[in-house]
Amino acid sequence: MPKRPTALACDDADYLFIADPGGDGADPAVWLVDIWQREVARRLDLGATPLDLVCVAGRVYALLALPATRPHSHAQKH
């Protein structure tokens, strides 16, 4: 289970989604918990840290923090 959850969302089927930033060797993930069975149904590993979650029309969306990239140079070499 996540140690520092950053966001929660619940769907119409009473599944709880937990955003986990990872850390201490664990990858960022979203955990899916069956509230009625009181057990983890799935862990979805992510390539970026989840910041927020929302459930809309039976789908869960995650806002991810993407790593900053260096700005592209517009100067062309001749």
Image: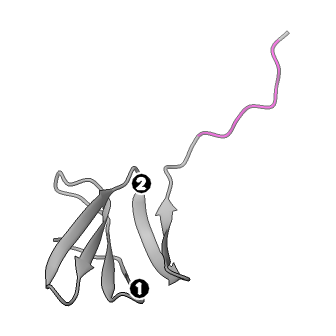
**How far across and how far down the image is residue 32, in percent?**
28, 73
Asked which secondary structure carries label 1, the reply is loop
Give above or below for 35 relative to 19.
Answer: below
Among the 4 quarters of the image, the one containing residue 13: bottom left
Separation of disc 1 and disc 2 at Cα?
A: 22 Å
Q: Secondary structure at mark 2?
A: loop
**Residue in front for this viewpoint, 16 or 49:** 16
Residue in the image at 49% along x and 80% along y: 58
Q: In this image, 22 relative to 3: left or right?
A: right
Lower sequence index among marks 1 and 2: 1
- Please give the name of the residue rendered at 19% of the width and 90% of the height, measured from the top-left corner: 36
Side of 22 relative to 10 (left or right): left
Residues packed near mark 2 inside 10 Å, few (<14), some (14 to 19) or many (20 plus): some
Along the viewing direction, whichever of 29 and 34 lies nearer the viewer: 34
Give coordinates of residue 43: x percent, y percent: 25, 62
**Majority secondary structure in the magenta region:** loop
Residue 3 visible in rendering: no
Residue 66 in magenta? no
Name the spot of residue 75 as percent of width and height, x first: 82, 26
> What amino acid is found at the position of numbered circle 1 in the picture?
Asp
Quadrant placement of the C terminus: top right
Q: Which residues are magenta?
A: 70-77
Of residue 1 and residue 39, the one placed in the foreground of this image is 39
Disc 1 crowd rating (10 Å Cα; few below 14, some 14-19, many 20+) is some
The N terminus lies in quadrant: bottom left
Which dot marks residue 48?
2
* Residue at left offset 41%, top offset 65%: 50
| Residue 11: mark in rendering | 1
Identify the residue at horizontal 15%, vertical 85% (top origin). 37
Please check the rendered image and state whether residue 74 is part of the magenta-colored stretch, yes or no: yes
